Image: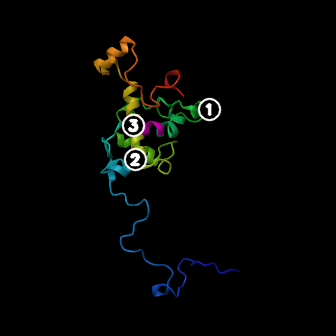
Amino acid sequence: MHDAPRYDPLEASAVFPKGSSAQPLVTGTVARGQLNEDEHLYTGKVGGAPVATFPFAMTRADLDRGEERYNIYCSPCHSRTGDGNGMVVQRGYRRAASYHQDRLRAAPPGYFFDVMTNGFGAMPDYRAQVTVEDRWRIVAYIKALQLAHSATTADVPAKELEQLKSGKPPATAPAAGHGGGEKGGQQ
């Protein structure tokens, strides 16, 4: 009917060299998203084993971003506290893993990154929805949730513990989303 202004695969061409529409890639060409030379950053593993370190230093801004991304992508199943009883679970979806069980408390950061990247069990992968850097930030936030869940007063610096016991408000307001809202930070 209509000869579209495109080539079909392996169609003959009078324009391209060797008379073929299929041309070899230009030397050095890498497909978008495929130049992942840093194994630690892009897989969460080194030599096939999950890493125990983060590929870049985590700042307070990174942790805040991790909390934000966690609340968007992870909390519907894992809940905001990481106990595995999120809103979709409360409405009948399969219960998500609690980050506070011994096995996951002992898991290295690379394990969580790998699960977010590739999925595990009923959990789908989130590689298309969450950037590599944000996945690492979420991992840092999960580790912070785990630490906070099992923290005791002995873990609080003496100056801040004294301030808490006195009932005086902190000198600076907490960062947005860190308990500064109504009802103890629950949203």
Q: Position of residue 35 (x, y in %)?
A: 37, 60
In the image, what residue type sits under mark 2?
Glu
Circle 1/circle 3 CB separation < 8 Å: no
Residue linked to disc 1: 91
Specify the principal SS of the magenta part: helix
Q: Nearer the viewer, residue 153 or 180?
A: 180
In three-dimensional space, the C-alpha distance between marks 1 and 3, rounded to whole angstroms, equals 29 Å
Q: Earlier in the sequence, mark 1 or mark 2?
A: 1
Residue stretch in magenta: 62-68
Q: Residues within 10 Å of mark 2 (few under 14, many from 20)?
A: some
In the image, what residue type sits under mark 1?
Arg
Residue linked to disc 3: 63
Q: Is residue 57 visible?
A: yes
Which residue is situated farthest in the top direction here?
A: 166
Classify the position of the C terminus by image quarter: top right
Q: Quadrant of residue 36?
A: bottom left
Residue linked to disc 2: 133
Q: Secondary structure at mark 2?
A: helix
Q: Secondary structure at mark 1?
A: loop
Horizontal relation, residue 95 to residue 63: left or right = right
Tell whether position 67 is magenta.
yes
